[in-house]
Amino acid sequence: MRLDTSASGVFPISATPFLDSGELDLASAETLTDFYLERGATGLTILGMMGEAPKLSPEESTAFLKVVLTCVAGRIPVVVGVSNPGLSAMAALAHEAMAAGAAGVMVAPLPSLKTEEQIINYYVMVCQALGPDVPVVLQDFPLVLGVSFSVPTLETIFARLPQIVMLKHEDWPGLSKLSRIRRGESERGDRRISILVGNGGLFLPQELARGADGAMTGYAYPEMLADVVQRFRAGDVEGAEDAFDVHLPLIRHETQPGLGLAVRKEILRRRGAIASAHVRSPGPKLDALDLAELTGLMNRLERRMARPA
């Protein structure tokens, strides 16, 4: 299975589970993967920024991706984050992942890239290092990475590098950017790139209306994301908005800068997906008041979902 420009739906960004001691929890890697599969995932992304990939050793990254890919067993495409300042290390992990059954890899820009020429040349070098048979997802997340992709820069990259098949869109505000990309494709007859959106799903209904193909994000209720995408595709825009609105308070809570990962992992623990909500140091920890607030939000969500439509 190889990722291509037709990719759509919901690709959850997987957490990486650890034991309370901080060791990698491969048993929970299996239960977490099953959790995503059972809740409507059409793809999966591992070793992303939300997956604490920089905190893993190369051996841990390999062990985790092999467990996930074995569990998935080709049922859905799996994207592996391989971002690394060194192209040789990036290529080694990418080729290892592809050999194990990954569908493609995701590459974020280096924070040092500032000009359009630097950004374009970097992705040319990335594709050369990976080789033409490795499909690539370009991650556009300027709020965290500090690199801003203009629409003309993205269009140049997509035109020059056909192995880049997907844009992970996390610009904020980014709705007009989505519209401009889709309008440019239509007006020039360019290939239509797959676009999946992040930001915790916070703007998903509007992004779908602007031409996004789905979501690539880590919200701990992936079944809602799948439901919203399915309703939108079926033309039930109001139903999609209604399903999304029920979750909005928890989505907002989960996307807090600095604390969101700990919240997300605690929800996954409470939902039985992982055994421990441990975030590797340095990382956020929830105190008693944080946990009580989360209980209230989750209880409120359950009550609202139980109401008749």
Image (spheres, grey):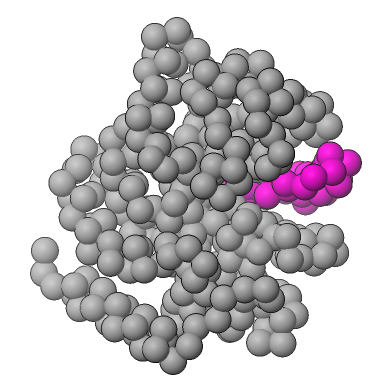
Residue 209 on image: x %, y % = 28, 35
Position of the N terminus, as image quadrant, is top right
The span shown in magenta is: 76-102
Horizontally, residue 57 falls left or right of residue 196, namely right
Which residue is painted at 68% across and 42% down in the image? 111
Horizontally, residue 46 falls left or right of residue 290, namely right
Q: Which image quadrant is residue 175 in? A: top left
Which residue is painted at 37% across and 18% down in the image? 183
Horizontally, residue 28 falls left or right of residue 267, namely right
Residue 158 on image: x %, y % = 59, 21
Camera sees residue 2: no
Say whether residue 80 is magenta. yes
Say above or below: 162 vs 57: above
Say above or below: 219 vs 141: below
Camera sees residue 153: yes
Residue 288 on image: x %, y % = 44, 92
Horizontally, residue 66 falls left or right of residue 7, namely right
> Extreme bottom residue here?
288
Q: Which image quadrant is residue 13 in? A: bottom right
Position of the C terminus, as image quadrant, is bottom left
Say above or below: 243 vs 221: above
Viewer-nearest residue: 205 or 9: 205
Which residue is painted at 46% across and 40% down in the image? 171
> Extreme left residue here?
308
Which residue is painted at 48% across and 68% down in the image? 260
Viewer-nearest residue: 15 or 100: 15
Residue 28 on image: x %, y % = 63, 76
Viewer-nearest residue: 206 or 38: 206
| Number of numbered discs overlaid on the protein picture | 0
Say whether residue 120 is magenta. no
